[in-house]
Image (tube, rainbow, N blue to C red):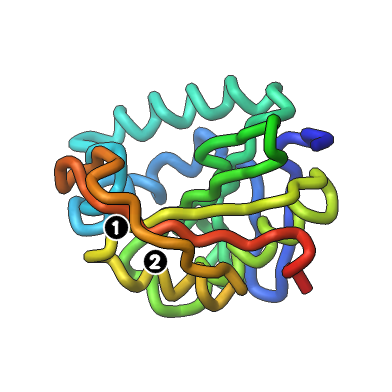
Amino acid sequence: MKHLGTVKLETKRLVLRRFEYADSEAAFRNWTGDPRVTEFLRWKKHSAISETQSLARFWDGKYSDPKWYHWAIVPKDIGEAVGTISAANIYDDTDTIEVGYCIGRAFQNKGYTTEALRAVIGFFFVSVGACRIEAKHDPRNPASGRVMEKCGMTYEGTLRRSERTNKGIVDVRVYSILREEYR
């Protein structure tokens, strides 16, 4: 793969761009401080905006790494970050990228996550040269799986008690799409 780092991507309704320190307030309000949004995630909700600001500084420092892929999801009509999408893991030996995403409750069920995932899948296949994109979700969060299915990903199976999230050690459903399946 040819790693390019987090480059700006644009869709009909979204701008996917680097997360900036100035996004911290919107992030805390929209998703990092919401226990219902973080319920199925690997990281705990933030108790104070200072936690989100600290994370923003960390993310900013990572953007010089060409293997760091982390986008703020910004609807054009809203103009502020409503979530993030990123490469959760990169497996260079198999040209595989695992994608993860998170979006604020007020912005769920509007197609933003599906639109963002489609853009990121295209970027990873066309520009980076990935052969496989995968994603996982807790079976108790079926909406996340529907996003994957809408993006052409295929359900491969359930890994039993294989991940630790805010729910404890949980099962995860694995989805993938291969480069030759991408349209």
Q: How many numbered tags mark residues here?
A: 2
Residue 34 is at least partly visible in this image: no
Q: How crowded is mark 1: few (under 14 residues within 10 Å), some or many (20 or more)?
A: many
Q: Considering the numbered disc 1 on the image, is that residue within a helix, a strand or a loop?
A: loop
Q: Is residue 8 left or right of residue 176?
A: right
Which amino acid does the dot numbered 2 rest on?
Ser
The residue beneath circle 1 is 138
Nearest to the observer: residue 114 or residue 160? 160
Q: Which residue is drawn at 19% across and 41% down?
A: 169
Q: What x and y, as percent, mark residue 69?
A: 63, 39
The answer to whether the residues at label 2 and label 1 have Cβ atoms under 8 Å apart is yes
Instruction: Tell me residue 131's x, y (percent).
Output: 74, 50
Q: Identify the residue under disc 2.
A: 144
Residue 16 seen: yes
- The Cα–Cα distance between marks 2 and 1, rounded to whole angstroms, is 8 Å
Please, is residue 107 above or below residue 44 in the view? below
Which x, y percent locates residue 96? 65, 43
Residue at image point 73% right, 28% down = 66
Most foreground residue, 155 or 121: 155
Q: Please name whichever residue, 142 or 80, is drawn nearer the observer in this view of the structure.
A: 142
